[in-house]
Structure formats: structure tokens, C-alpha cells
Image: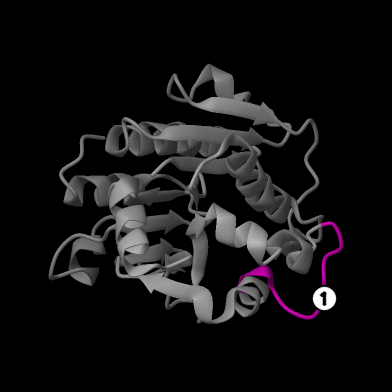
Amino acid sequence: MSVLLYSGCSVRTELRRDMTRLWSRVMRQVNPNIDMLLFDSASEYPPETYIEPGILISHFGDNPGHLSHGGFDGAGRTFFAGIEYAANAGYDYAVTCETDLLFVRPINEVVERMDSANVKVACLQMNEYRFFEWGFVAINVAWARDIEWEQKYDWRNPKPSAIPELRNEWICGNDLFILPYRGIRNSGPFTDAANLPRLFPYGPPDWIHENNAKDLSVMHAFLKLNGMAT
């Protein structure tokens, strides 16, 4: 099976630059033989200057914004650009992992589990916001084209009726499965570097999503729990 791992970035601050650099290092370390693609939306800190070598970069040339901040659906554009690229390049699976989310299980492990169970699309469980975690999604590329996912979502014309996470859930319907990997969004006051081990007393989390944190201390604590150098 051929797999593309992709993400997007629009780096405006030093903190976001450092997070994107860390993401590229961790994802490459865990997945040394996976093709990686990064879509850049007019970053003020060009990713070529700090991400790991060997990651292909594609530039959109503009930054349309984010729906949650009153802008355009830049995340939707990136999401479907990756699926389109994977389809045109002949990949079997496309896996998107946002640049503020660290996932420390091998991507090949994910797609092999999906393939053996005939799962077409899978994302993560996430309790904080009571919807699924779409910051990490593994997608069967042929299936995504067959159901015309991009046309149904229609990122060029944002809909006020529901947030993108719920719209994707409805579009995928019964084909959507939840991956059995544990993690957390670093978005609440209860999550810090000191108490992260207590939140996962039966083993380290598999992923963490940095959500507007003021520094990367929790990300480094997460990597330390997983025995990875920071």
C-alpha cells in the first residue's frame, strides 16, 4: 500500500514556527519511509528554512483564513488538496495530521489496520468538544473520490449550518470509524506538563493536539512520556 502523509501550515509567530519544526521532526522520526507533503498558506516564516529535509512543500500563495476566526475555509482547502494530490499521484491512502498535532504511532500501522478491516475513513476520539478529532484522519483515496466527498463538503462555499467536523461526520456516515488511539487536546487549564502523566495512568497517550498553548512544554512532556528525545 502506498501512503501520503500531509498537512498544512500558515506560520505567523515564532511559537508556531517552533511547533511546525517539532511536528516535522517527530513525524519524520516515526515515519522515516513515508512520503510527506506540506501545504503552505503564505507563511511569514517560510517552512523551507526550518522543517525536516525530504518533506515536499506546495505553496498556495495566499492565506484565506480560518472559519473559526471569521475567515475563509483554509483548512478545508488544504484537506481536500491533499486527497486530490494523493489521487493524482496514485496513492492508496492519504493521512492528514495537522501541524499542531503530534501522533507517535507509525502511519503504516494505522492504514494496515484499516485495510485489514476494510475501513474507508477513520479519525480520532476527542472528548473535550464532544465531536471527533479531525486533526488526524486516514482516508482511502479511491473511496473519497467515489463518494465525491469534496463536492459534498464544498469548501469554496462555507455553510453556516454546522461546523466542519460535524459536516464531515455526516458526509462519511457509516463508513467512518474511530481509531483506537488515546490522546488529548491541550486546550484546558487542567492540562500542563506536570499533570499530563496523571491524566494517562495506564500508559502514555498516542497523540496530543496543541490548541493555542502559550508554549510547547506540554508537547515536550508528551514526547518524554513516549520515550522520545526533545
Which residue appears at 29% of the width and 33% of the height?
29
Relative to the observer, which residue lies in front, 114 or 8? 114
Task: Give the residue at mark 1.
Answer: 160
Q: Is residue 129 visible?
A: no
> Residue 189 at x, y = what percent?
42, 68
Mark 1 Cα within 10 Å, few/some/many (few <14, many 20+)? few
> Residue 221 at x, y = what percent?
26, 49
Q: Quadrant of residue 203?
A: bottom left
For the image, the number of numbered tags is 1
Q: Is residue 195 visible?
A: yes
Which residue appears at 55% of the width and 53% of the height?
141
> Residue 16 at x, y = what percent?
54, 39
Which residue appears at 33% of the width and 52% of the height?
218
Instruction: For mark 1, give the secondary structure.
Output: loop
Q: Please indicate whether residue 229 sits to the left or right of residue 191 in the image.
A: left
Q: Amino acid at mark 1?
A: Pro
Q: Please indicate whether residue 163 sits to the left or right of residue 159 in the image.
A: left
Most frequent secondary structure within the magenta stretch: loop
Q: Quadrant of residue 117?
A: bottom left
Q: Which quadrant of the figure contains the C terminus? A: top left
